[in-house]
Amino acid sequence: MTQNRYIIVGGVAGGMSAATRLRRLDENARITVFERGGHVSFANCGLPYYLGGVIEERSSLLLQTPASLAGRFALDVRVRTEVIGIDSAAKTVRVRDLGTGEESTEPYDALVLSPGASPVRPPLPGGDRMLSLRDIDDVDAAMSALAVAPRSALVIGAGFIGLEMVENLVHRGLDVTLVELGDQVLPPLDPEMAGPVADRLRAAGVSVRLGTQVTELDADSATLSDGSVVAADFVLAAIGVRPDTALATAAGLTIGQRGGIQVDDQLRTSAPGIYAIGDAVEKTDAISGEQRLVALAGLANRHGRLVADAITGKTIRVRPALGTAVVGMMGLAIAATGWNEKLLRARGRAIRVFHTHPASHTGYYPGAEPMALKLVVDAETDAILGAQGVGGNGVDKRIDVIATAMAGGITASELADLELAYAPQFSSAKDPVNMLGYVALNAAEGLTPSVQWHELEAARDAGATLIDVRTAGEYAEAAIPGSVNIPLDDLRARRAELPEGRLIVHCKVGQRGHTAVRLLAQLGRDAVNLDGGYLTWAAGTGAARTDPERAAAALLPA
């Protein structure tokens, strides 16, 4: 029997999924994995939590070793070994042992590239003491830096990994400054969804510095672009990653416009017999059909399995990527899938947007936690284009359901009819996902037109009047300036008080506003709902305030 020779460059999620799947499909094959790092299988998503002391044992991060993989799967796994060249015509790779410097040539029948991505490290004076967190060597270096008991920490970048690092450094007792070049934390979210996340960080004592960047690092401090100096005994960069394509480029493989290795729908590169998976590879975007970079462990694992199937002759289907992601921070769960509103509007897409503020389960059962959900929908087809969620328990479940609906072609209105599990401690009889479906259906049928929080000012400038239909007590506690308070239960009796022209009604979260719009429409009035109510407006306008504006507001008398 002919023995197939499979070589995999890079381990961890993608590479090891491919290797073990290949073994399950081809017991006779010779399977060799080359990993230039010291560990071939580790929990890189757990690194921040080991750094923060939540995961106590380093060994918990190490999932498999070359010995264990050899024993169970008969894999030849060589760590500290780098593939330095590919001869695609001869079907060989050139390999260097990083310990001894010895080089050898290895033949293959199929080659899988899974080199991953490298952390972005901004070039700046003093930047050599900046740490990153991508592998076991990185976390060991970071733990050594923490062993000298620093008092302050600086995290550069407010993406998912940056927020995980902030939480864990706060957990260790450090005074943390978070610096982000953009005007909000978590760029994949829209401002009104990201604003409460920044508020939670500030409430935990984190100094959140938006719209700025680090220009210089000194021994124990950092200078920012606004001229300020912040304490920074410990510095970690979490700006993002770039695909590691050096080997593929040198081999003449096609690199896509986004900078990743280009593959087809069977995960094949431009060279026969060479496949590529993981963070170094461009994926097809589920919303636009364009190529994009998506560095997620779930995709790497799934594509590792799929590439093994393709190599062994199975028919595979590589689904377009939604980019579904979640992060936990300071008691919040923050999740997103698909595209956000700001990106879709920048592309000129006709969309409808819906905000809701449900509880994680029925309010009468103890422990219900609030959440904010956002759904972005194609205005013509009712297709779901994206969703975001911020809150307590249950956010991840709702975003996962919506991501599944998107993959299955379920429209926004059809979310209303999903049959989802219900018991008081888990949900409500009308699950938050169902409620999003009801709101989308009302909009699709023209029952409840709405305006967004960022459209309110222009609508009022055009002559619309804002009617607050909350109770007098709610209005007295906090209100949108210039609004007129007529509680919903008084609206019929007091309709003569309503001014002429368009009315924008709002309540706390949108539900009473919907009822008011239906009442006013049947009374012959032109009425629209402020989507998401006061809570969404407050989150959006609050997120738009700069750090100096926040500081000035804090000095005002209560």
Image (cartoon, rainbow, N blue to C red):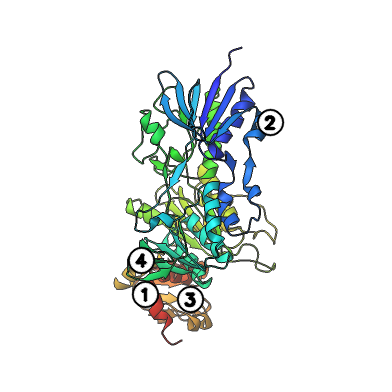
Residues 245 and 283: in front is: 245
Q: Looking at the image, tell me whether mark 2 or mark 4 is earlier in sequence order.
A: 2
Query: Outermost residue toward the top?
Result: 1
> How far apart are labels 1 and 3 at the CA level?
33 Å
Tag 1 residue = 548
Residue plotted at (63% across, 19% down):
28
**Would residue 107 appear left or right of 424 to someone viewing this image?**
left
Inspect the image, locate mark 2, and give the three-letter code of the amino acid beneath it.
Answer: Arg
Residue plotted at (52% across, 80% down):
474
Q: Which mark is residue 469?
A: 3
Q: Position of residue 211 (x, y in %)?
A: 36, 64
Tag 2 residue = 72
Q: Secondary structure at mark 2?
A: helix
Circle 2 crowding by C-alpha within 10 Å: few under 14, some 14–19, many from 20: few
Query: Outermost residue toward the bottom?
Result: 557
Q: Which mark is residue 224?
A: 4
Foreground tag (3 vs 4): 4
Q: Quadrant of the N terminus?
A: top right
Inspect the image, locate mark 4, and give the three-letter code of the amino acid beneath it.
Answer: Leu
Circle 4 crowding by C-alpha within 10 Å: few under 14, some 14–19, many from 20: some
